[in-house]
Amino acid sequence: MSAPQDALVVVGVDDSRLSMTAVRLAAREAVLHSRPLRVVHAFNWVADPSEPMPDEPRRPAEELLDRALAAATDAQPDVEASCALIEGPVITTLLRESGSAALLVIGDGGLTVDPDVAAASDATAVQIAARAGCSVLVAREQLPSNGPVLVGVDGSTSSLGALDFAFDTASRHATDLMVVQVCDPDGSTGEPPTEIVEQLAEAVAPWQRKYPSVRVDQQVRLGDPESALARETHKAELVVVSARGDEPWRGMLGSVSQAMLYHSSSPVVVVRNAHGLYVQE
């Protein structure tokens, strides 16, 4: 989580149950990275004509933030937490918050359980993950079970940022790391090409030296990257992917990061990083 030390972990909340899961995940990351937590609720003041106007429009929003702060401190008593009630659209508000955050945490809004949401290209979680100014952690309905951190790499410069984030996360979470690269089979043997296996080992080696306590499982899988990585997510505590992968000109999110938002069984971190990231020997 390479950001100024005073940068916050920000979590966006609404009145869904999933928001409290996102708050707990955000509180954990804030404590593990020794960062303050900021709980944000975007409040649209436009009244719904089909609903009766409450006597005090702000009260439900303020009560929501109180519940979120209580959930954060219950999950992580040592967290330094504050809250903000901000007038404006949700996406605009959270994108603005992401500009100065170390990490933005949001719920997935039903991407994995509601076909109508999953089919919508303008789903809030996808819009935010695509356009945020920092890395985005997208929570699922349930808190993750114990398991390794899973990171997908493709040999690109941007995937090194995901690898760095994943090693750091595995170290802070005191868990294992599974590094997966997906490729086509060797034409003569049907096995993973030797050069891909060697390239993966070379890519991992500098971070393994930097984080010697992290136990790493390196896997080269064959087939379609989106499907192959999605199959591994059910056993992961957290899934880490870079925002764009090896074809950054194709759009704000690469195909693999989009697939993980829709199909990962575990929380997903979409990593944004500066180009040219490296580990100094």
Image (cartoon, helix red, strand yellow):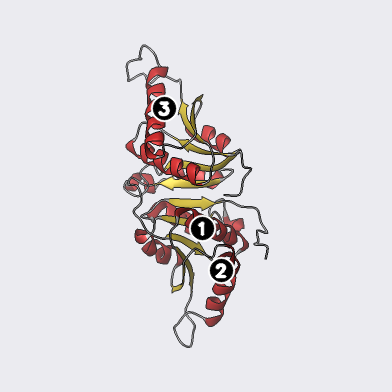
Q: Which mark is residue 254?
A: none
Disc 3 vs disc 2: Cβ atoms closer than 8 Å? no
Q: CA distance from mark 3 to mark 2?
A: 41 Å
Closer to the chain start, of discs 3 and 1, is 3
Q: Residue at x 32, y 16 (%)?
A: 52
Give residue 49's position: percent from left, percent from top. Answer: 36, 18
Task: Determine whether 58 is above or below 257 in the image.
Answer: above
The secondary structure type at the circle numbered 3 is: helix
Q: Residue at x 53, y 33 (%)?
A: 92
Closer to the chain start, of discs 1 and 2, is 1
The secondary structure type at the circle numbered 1 is: helix
Q: Look at label 2 and name its amino acid.
A: Val
Task: Determine whether 21 is above or below 199 in the image.
Answer: above
Residue 115 visible in the current orientation: yes
Report the residue marked by disc 1: 166
Q: CA distance from mark 1 to mark 2?
A: 11 Å
Task: Determine whether 56 is above or below 108 in the image.
Answer: above
The secondary structure type at the circle numbered 2 is: helix
Report the residue marked by disc 2: 204
Q: Position of 110 compared to 128: left or right?
A: left
Q: Look at label 3 and name its amino acid.
A: Leu
Closer to the chain start, of discs 3 and 2, is 3
Give residue 53's position: percent from left, percent from top. Answer: 35, 14
Q: Look at label 1 and name its amino acid.
A: Ala
Which part of the image, by quadrant, shows the C terminus? bottom right
Give residue 156's position: percent from left, percent from top. Answer: 60, 64
Q: Quadrant of residue 237?
A: bottom left
Q: Residues within 10 Å of mark 3 (few under 14, many from 20)?
A: many
Residue 122 visible in the current orientation: no
Report the residue marked by disc 3: 65
